[in-house]
Image (cartoon, grey):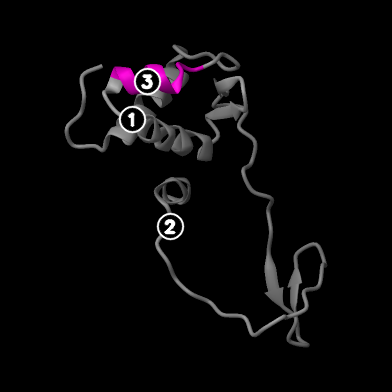
Amino acid sequence: MPPKKTQPKYRQIADYLREGILNGTFPAGQPLPSEEALAKQFGVTRPTVRQGLTELRASGLVEAIMGRGTFARSPHSRPSLTRPRGVRRASDGRYVEADGIRWTDAEPPVATRTDAPLALADLLR
């Protein structure tokens, strides 16, 4: 695969693997190339490869199994990455979760804004 100069290397790795998973080059349940092999193929270090794999893990396309490697997952059977939740403020001022669990404030709640990590921003669009 010829390198794309406009994207960071970890993104090129993630795109290469994503494309391979979606087109069947890397079938669901089968191991992906090792970090070492990908590092050699793209001329990068293993932490760069891990960053690309982390992006795919966040989108549910790969699964890392300790001691065995990283495996492709079916793009059609991805489970939800988060449990659906809702939090609202009850009339008595307490926070109540959608399933009825009550929270007790340990300190006054504070809301802040921050930039989402790239993988999360991609999921949230």
**According to the image, label 2 marks what residue?**
116
Q: Under tag 3, what secondary structure?
A: helix
Question: Label 1 to label 2, Cα distance in Å?
Answer: 25 Å
- Badge 2 amino acid: Ala
> The magenta stretch spans which residues?
32-41
Residue 38's disc is 3
Residue at the location (75% across, 82% down)? 94
Residue 93 coordinates in the image, percent (x, y): 73, 86
| Among numbered discs 1 and 3, the one appearing first in the sequence | 3
- Badge 1 amino acid: Thr
- Badge 3 amino acid: Leu
Q: In which quarter of the view is residue 115 placed?
A: bottom left
Q: Main secondary structure of the magenta part?
A: helix
User: The N terminus lies in which quarter of the figure?
Assistant: top left
Residue 108's disc is none
Disc 3 versus disc 2: nearer the observer: 3
Q: In which quarter of the view is residue 42 placed?
A: top left
Question: Label 3 to label 2, Cα distance in Å?
Answer: 27 Å
**According to the image, label 1 marks what residue?**
45
| Above or below 47: residue 117 | below
The foreground one among 104 and 82 is: 104
| Among numbered discs 1 and 2, the one appearing first in the sequence | 1
Residue 81 coordinates in the image, percent (x, y): 62, 43
